[in-house]
Amino acid sequence: MGTARTKANNKWNAKAYDRVNLVLKKDTSPTKDEVQAAADAEGVSLNAYIVAAISQQLNKEKP
């Protein structure tokens, strides 16, 4: 059983964040290692890199 703090954190995260499951094939580009290397080269986390890529694509699609 989790501590009160863990339960509170989980409750907050469930309320404040949406989760998305990303599945990448190991033998097809882009692989997780390729994306992680690109994120590392930018000096950001894997999550921040993916969010930035999605935001950039969404902004590009706006008329």
Image (cartoon, grey):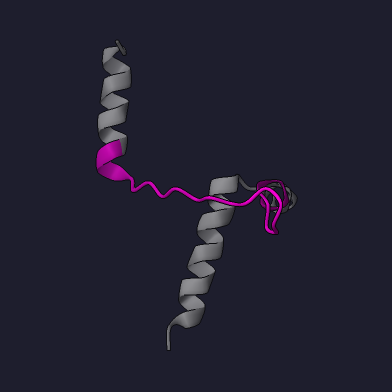
Q: In front: 35, or 51?
A: 35
Quadrant where the N terminus is found in the figure: top left
Residue 18 included in the magenta stretch of the image = yes
Residue 20, compared with residue 52, is above or below; it is: above
Residue in the image at 47% along x and 76% along y? 59
Q: Tell me where residue 46 appears, x and y as whole percent.
A: 60, 46
Left or right, 32 with respect to 60, comes to: right
How far from the left and from the top, in percent, is residue 39? 67, 51
Residue at the spot 69% in from the left edge and 57% down from the top edge: 28
| Nearest to the observer: residue 29 or residue 4 | 29
62 to 38, vertically: above or below:
below
Q: Position of residue 52 (x, y in %)?
A: 54, 60
Location of the C terminus (image quadrant)? bottom left
The rendered magenta stretch, by its main secondary structure, is classed as: loop
Residue at image location 47% in from the left, 81% down from the top = 61
* Lateral position of residue 20 relative to residue 45, left or right: left
Residue under the point 38% across and 46% down? 19
Q: Above or below — where is 14 with respect to 57?
A: above
Q: Is residue 19 magenta?
A: yes
Is 27 located above or below residue 14 in the figure? below
Q: Which residues are magenta?
A: 14-35
Count of picture labels: 0
